[in-house]
Image: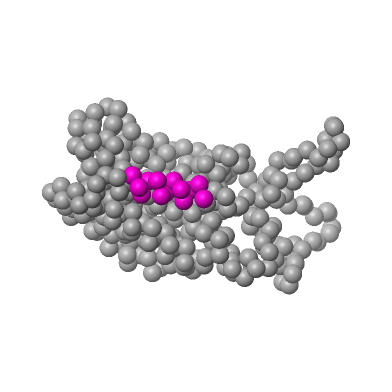
Amino acid sequence: MIFGIAYVRALRRWLLAGTAVAEACVVPYGETGPVAGALAVGWVALVTGAFRGLDHADGVAGTVGVVTAFGVGVCAEVELMDGPAVLLPVPAAALAGFLPHNWHPARIALGACGSLFTGFLLAGAAVLARTGYGPVGGAGVLCALTAVPVADAVLVLLSRRLAGRPLSRGGPDRLAHRLRRLGLTAQGAVVVLGGAALCAVAVGVLTHTGRVGGQAALGVVGGAAAGVLGLLRVRVYGPARLRSTGPDGRGARARTDAYPRVRRPRAGVSQAPRGATGGAGGASFRAAIFPVRQATSTENVQVGAPLRVRNG
């Protein structure tokens, strides 16, 4: 198991390094300058990784990808960029055809290759479409075009940092998971995120075409930041355990492990997981497999289907 974890971490480093090299070759430094070009590379890296994170929930990456692809394609068409304008409808149509198979319950997912390619293509095309504009207005439009993926990535980074968890350690802490905790169904979470992406992309396109002022794009950024701060209050990690063996006699806060330790059966004794046969014990067994806050009976009704975490 140790070698498997080391292999996964090494694979993630190679994916990150290869993506960064590809992103560095896309940005037009002659028109953006070295500083803005470096910032663009970082932004493309963030959006690329964010689309991989959206693939953790059924239907989210496909829905947001379709909306974003059409929005960036319109921006490229306005700038008379024939290459991106002709290219972007192709992944949009592909994602639209893929979405019925990725809808909950999904039969197939984009995976690392599909999600990274989608995020890289859309982010790179958006950077090319906004090349030549002011840095503040350009950043506002770029953030509006990719508001949902960026909000998901920022939410995960902040929540794991505040919880003291490694950034590479997966968990049910993304936008779709938190919306499920608030009582939405899996399909409802996709509809909410898709509607949010549609509104944000529409504002980005209108700002890019000059129909509305740059304050609208900045308003989208502020709304996304408010949503991230609000969803940070949704508890998704297990509660911290207390020990009563502290040196001063008071309970010392123990390290919370999201995946509880599994006890090995003694030699010659066959032990089945407690509650695995159903009934009230089945709920406790599911809670042990999926390490989140212990839900009440009302929450169990609201969140009927189990949340799934595909990648890290």
User: Is residue 94 visible to the viewer in this orientation of the structure?
Assistant: yes
Percent across and percent down for residue 85 are 18, 53
Residue 302, compared with residue 129, is above or below; it is below
Can residue 259 be seen in the rendering of this structure? no
Residue at the image position 56 percent from the left and 64 percent from the top: 183
189 displayed left or right of 45 = right
Residue 6 colored in magenta in the image:
no
Whole-percent x, y for residue 214 in the image: 26, 44
In which quadrant is the N terminus drawn? top right
Q: Nearer the viewer, residue 188 or 88?
A: 188
Task: Return the residue found at the far top.
Answer: 34
Q: Where does residue 139 sit, x and y in percent of width and height?
A: 30, 40
Residue 195 coordinates in the image, percent (x, y): 38, 61
Which of the 4 quarters of the picture holds residue 280?
Answer: bottom right
The extreme right residue here reads 249
Position of 95 compared to 180: left or right?
left
- Residue at 52%, 59% in the rendered image: 179
**Vertical arrangement, residue 307 with respect to residue 100, above or below:** above
- The residue located at (52%, 65%) in the rendering is 184
Quick check: 243 above or below 71?
above
Q: Main secondary structure of the magenta part?
A: helix
Magenta span: 218-230
Q: Quick check: is 220 in the magenta stretch?
A: yes
Question: 7 or 121, which lies in front?
Answer: 121
**As drawn, 71 above or below 160:** below
Camera-nearest residue between 251 and 17: 251
Q: Is residue 139 left or right of residue 150?
A: left
Residue 89, picture quadrant:
bottom left
